[in-house]
Image (cartoon, rainbow, N blue to C red):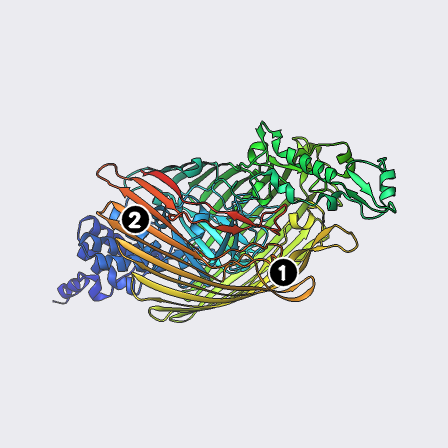
């Protein structure tokens, strides 16, 4: 009797006697799944999932249970199992041969607002609500349904940005959280984690060259992120994340194609294509874009109409007359004491133009607009052409990739017609960037992940960059001597060139010693060869023929070393509370003796998430390594200053959010920034007429950002609001209280969309920008224009019908529906003579988009 009883006990199911939780248990569950015994899959794994499996086995168990629940139409339970899987591994990608319903569920939960995963804040995957920063995400679906044609259009619909669209060397100046500068250099732009800001100037060329067909999402970090990214992640970070192969290839296929062909107003043409393929452990993606636009006509503005009447207001007597020692001036220049164009005072000390002389100078200046340069009469033109190609190859744990782009656009709009000519006359700006990278990633164990990224970047301002400018009497480049000879104004072409290179390596380790502690650490080293000043020449080969005056000591090429060591740890102190501490050490040396030396960038964050609420308190410090262009360039009348220190920012913010349901969420964020050592331009007393960049500024910025979103299957809506009060508190004259110019105090964006008849999606978006102050009492005192509040409405209609052709859609976009006339503030000093005070924005304009996803 004893033996049969013992045998019976041994044959009892394992969950009765105490289950063994190991790979054998998973293999049995897999066999049950293949046999269609879904109830046995679930029952055999439930106990081990609760306690027994390690994290690696738990992931596979949740996968099998989710697929089993889907097979029995228990969608809610399948969703729960998938969510639990993603809690363990937020970057989990379903297998290409998994059931399509499971693949869709994984992808949906990864981008859902309830459990959205971001990777940019801490250089690792984490829930957006637990990330130690304020962050916004625009998904692929948002980009598609809203009809964006470039990244700048995307930024118009998120909080925290002021834009000055000026269609010049940069498409737009982008000011994040109220910090206005001459260029977009305070925000770090990344493409899949690889830096895009120009090596020499630190400008972020956020333009129309980037293909949208291959974007999975765009993550925007608000506030300094130097703890993880080092110098130059000052005001924030924009990380454009491409689709991985699994996202790009539909289940059951080995190749995926996504393409867009667009045509619209201003003869805008876009071809956007991405091709992905996979076989076993090898996959690739190749993306590219071609873009052209004539841009909108600005000749209705006095700054770009090339109207000779502009010279009627010029006081030529003031420009060409001689206020003292006139007789000595005439003798020195071998000029007669009597001439129809001028007359001497009784004591021969002063010289003034006669009416005939002033009229002659005016008519000569007017004649410049009738000249032909570059095969075209002088006038406004501002065409844009750009291209980009991007490729990546994945082989097991290794990735290899490259990207190269170039655009060519008129640089006129940062100047006026009193100084510069249009693109058809040869005035163009043509930057080019290329990078190559290799990455190795390996999940060594459940607790240890390592990654190594090596990049090589080459950034140029190519020889297609040309400034076509006039030498005339009104600008002071022609003198009385020229007037006596009736010398006509001349247009000259200045060719510009720069080239900088960088080799960078970053080793990153993510270690989880326990389920409550997560540590990510990294070490990066950069070696850069950066230019000091522009190579410029009056002939078409500036890199060969340029003479740099004054020539920088040691030559115009600077060898720069940057070392960075960072570590950030997150501790789950309580069930709903996470504390993050981070610190980065940066060391910079230029040649042997210059550079900023050592800097520390800390981050502290406490995130408390009880139930449906999230509360964050964040402190972070950021630094800005002043660019070589800012230090060493002697453009115009500027004296180089290699002793510039880093700018620094201290950011304090608190936020709260609520998720009432899967459909509805809201959050609000309040921040205050203290910014020191800001570089500004000052007059050099010991060198009259010369200016120099110096660390002279202090700023304080207070702001609020708020978001509300509501999403259902067939309709959704969002609202966001921005309040910003930026002040300059210190300048070269001492303590001041100046409002930062060009920044609106209030902005809001409102959008809604609805799917009709299962095929027709209608999207409407509204952008409100409050008054933007300039002039006296602001940091842009010479701009006397006004910029009242404006409300712009944009709309997109998308039609797709799988019965016609699966993956094909036709889209019609209309921006500025009401054809509102409005202006953005000009760039730099915007004084209205050589730099325009305002730029007319595009009126009602259209875009037709035919897209196909295979």
Direction from residue 333 to residue 483 in the image, left or right: left
Q: Looking at the image, how many numbered discs can be counted on the residues? A: 2
Asked if 744 appears above or below 351 in the picture, the reply is below
- The answer, for residue 575, to whether it is visible in the render is yes
Query: x, y (%) of residue 359?
Result: 70, 38
Distance from Cα at disc 2 to Cα at disc 1: 50 Å
Q: Nearer the viewer, residue 600 or 799?
A: 799
Direction from residue 639 to residue 455 in the image, left or right: left
- The answer, for residue 551, to whether it is visible in the render is no
> Residue at left 48%, top 39%?
295
Circle 2 sits on which residue? 762
Q: Nearer the viewer, residue 97 or 404?
A: 404
Q: Quadrant of residue 119?
A: bottom left
Q: Nearer the viewer, residue 499 or 250?
A: 499
Q: Quadrant of residue 809?
A: top left
* Marked residue nearer the N-terminal end (2 or 1): 1
Mark number for residue 333? none
Element at badge 2? Answer: strand
Element at badge 1? Answer: strand
Query: x, y (%) of residue 445?
Result: 42, 55
> Residue at left 45%, top 45%?
842
Circle 1 sits on which residue? 599
């Amino acid at each position: 009797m004893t033996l049969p009883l013992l045998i019976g006990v041994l044959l009892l199911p394992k969950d009765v006697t105490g289950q063994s939780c190991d790979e054998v248990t998973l293999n049995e569950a897999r066999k049950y799944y293949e046999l269609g015994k879904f109830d046995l899959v679930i029952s055999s794994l439930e106990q081990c999932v609760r306690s027994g499996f390690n994290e690696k086995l738990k992931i596979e168990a949740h996968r099998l249970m989710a697929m089993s629940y889907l097979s029995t139409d228990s969608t809610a339970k399948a969703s729960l199992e998938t969510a639990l899987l993603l809690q363990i591994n937020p970057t989990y990608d379903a297998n290409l041969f998994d059931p399509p319903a499971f693949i869709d569920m994984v992808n949906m939960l990864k981008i859902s607002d309830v459990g959205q995963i971001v990777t940019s804040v801490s250089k690792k995957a984490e829930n957006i609500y637990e990330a130690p920063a304020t962050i916004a995400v625009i998904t692929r679906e948002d980009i598609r349904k809203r009809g964006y044609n470039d990244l700048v259009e995307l930024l118009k619909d998120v909080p925290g940005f002021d834009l000055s669209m000026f269609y010049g060397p940069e498409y737009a100046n982008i000011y994040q959280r109220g910090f206005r500068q001459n260029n977009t250099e305070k925000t770090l732009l990344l493409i899949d984690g690889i830096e895009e800001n120009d090596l020499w100037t630190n400008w972020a060329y956020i333009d129309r060259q980037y293909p949208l067909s291959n974007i999975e999402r765009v993550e925007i970090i608000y506030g300094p992120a130097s703890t993880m990214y080092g110098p130059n992640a000052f005001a924030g970070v924009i990380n454009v994340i491409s689709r991985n192969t699994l996202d790009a290839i539909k289940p059951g296929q080995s190749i995926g194609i996504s393409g867009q062909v667009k045509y619209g107003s201003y003869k805008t043409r876009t071809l956007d294509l991405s091709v992905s393929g996979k076989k076993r452990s090898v996959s690739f993606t190749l993306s590219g874009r071609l873009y052209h636009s004539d841009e909108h006509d600005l000749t209705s503005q006095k700054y770009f109409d090339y109207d000779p009447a502009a010279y009627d207001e010029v006081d030529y007597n003031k420009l060409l007359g001689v206020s003292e020692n006139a007789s000595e001036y005439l003798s020195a220049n071998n000029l007669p004491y009597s001439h129809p164009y001028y007359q001497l005072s009784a004591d021969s000390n002063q010289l003034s133009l006669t009416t005939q002389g002033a009229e002659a100078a005016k008519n000569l200046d007017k004649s410049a607009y009738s000249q032909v340069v570059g095969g075209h009469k002088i006038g406004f033109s501002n065409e844009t052409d750009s291209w980009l190609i991007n490729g990546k190859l994945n082989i097991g744990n290794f990735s290899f990739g490259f990207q190269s782009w170039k655009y060519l656009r008129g640089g006129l709009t940062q100047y006026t017609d009193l100084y510069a000519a249009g693109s058809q006359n040869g005035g163009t700006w043509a930057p080019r960037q290329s990078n190559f990278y290799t990455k190795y990633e390996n999940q060594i164990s459940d607790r240890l992940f390592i990654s190594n990224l090596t990049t090589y970047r080459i950034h140029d301002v190519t020889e297609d960059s040309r400034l076509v400018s006039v030498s005339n009497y009104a600008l002071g480049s022609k003198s009385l001597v020229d007037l006596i000879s009736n010398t006509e104004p001349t247009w000259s072409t200045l060719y510009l060139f720069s080239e900088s290179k960088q080799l960078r390596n970053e080793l990153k380790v993510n270690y989880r010693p326990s389920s409550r502690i997560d540590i990510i650490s990294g070490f990066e080293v950069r070696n850069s060869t950066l230019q000091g000043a522009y190579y410029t020449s009056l002939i078409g080969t500036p890199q060969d023929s340029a003479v740099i005056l004054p020539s920088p000591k040691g030559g115009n090429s600077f060898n720069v070393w940057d070392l960075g060591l960072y570590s950030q740890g997150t501790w789950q102190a309580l069930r709903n509370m996470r504390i993050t501490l981070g610190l980065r050490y940066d060391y910079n040396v230029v040649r042997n003796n210059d550079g900023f030396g050592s800097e520390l960038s800390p981050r502290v964050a406490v995130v408390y998430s009880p139930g449906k609420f999230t509360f964050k308190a964040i402190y972070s410090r950021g630094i800005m390594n002043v660019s070589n262009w800012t230090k060493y360039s002697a453009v115009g009348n500027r004296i180089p200053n290699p002793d510039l220190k880093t700018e620094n920012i201290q950011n304090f913010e608190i936020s709260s959010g609520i998720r009432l349901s899967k459909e509805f969420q809201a959050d609000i964020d309040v921040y205050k920034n203290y910014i020191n050592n800001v570089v500004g331009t000052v007059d050099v007393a010991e060198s009259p007429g010369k200016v120099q960049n110096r660390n002279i500024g202090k700023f304080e910025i207070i702001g609020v950002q708020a978001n509300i979103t509501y999403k259902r299957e067939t309709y959704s809506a969002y609202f966001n609001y921005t309040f910003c009060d930026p002040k300059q508190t210190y300048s070269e004259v001492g303590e001041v209280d100046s409002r930062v110019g060009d920044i609106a105090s209030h902005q809001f964006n409102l959008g809604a969309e609805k799917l009709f008849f299962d095929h027709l999606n209608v999207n409407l978006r509204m952008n409100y920008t409050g008054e933007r102050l300039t002039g006296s009492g602001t940091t842009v005192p010479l701009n006397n224009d006004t910029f009242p509040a404006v409300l712009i409405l944009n709309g997109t209609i998308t039609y797709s019908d799988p019965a016609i052709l699966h993956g094909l859609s036709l889209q019609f976009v209309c921006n500025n529906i009401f054809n509102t006339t409005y202006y953005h503030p000009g760039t730099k000093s915007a004084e209205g003579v050589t730099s325009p005070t305002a730029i007319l924005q595009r009126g009602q304009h259209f875009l037709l988009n035919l897209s196909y996803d295979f």
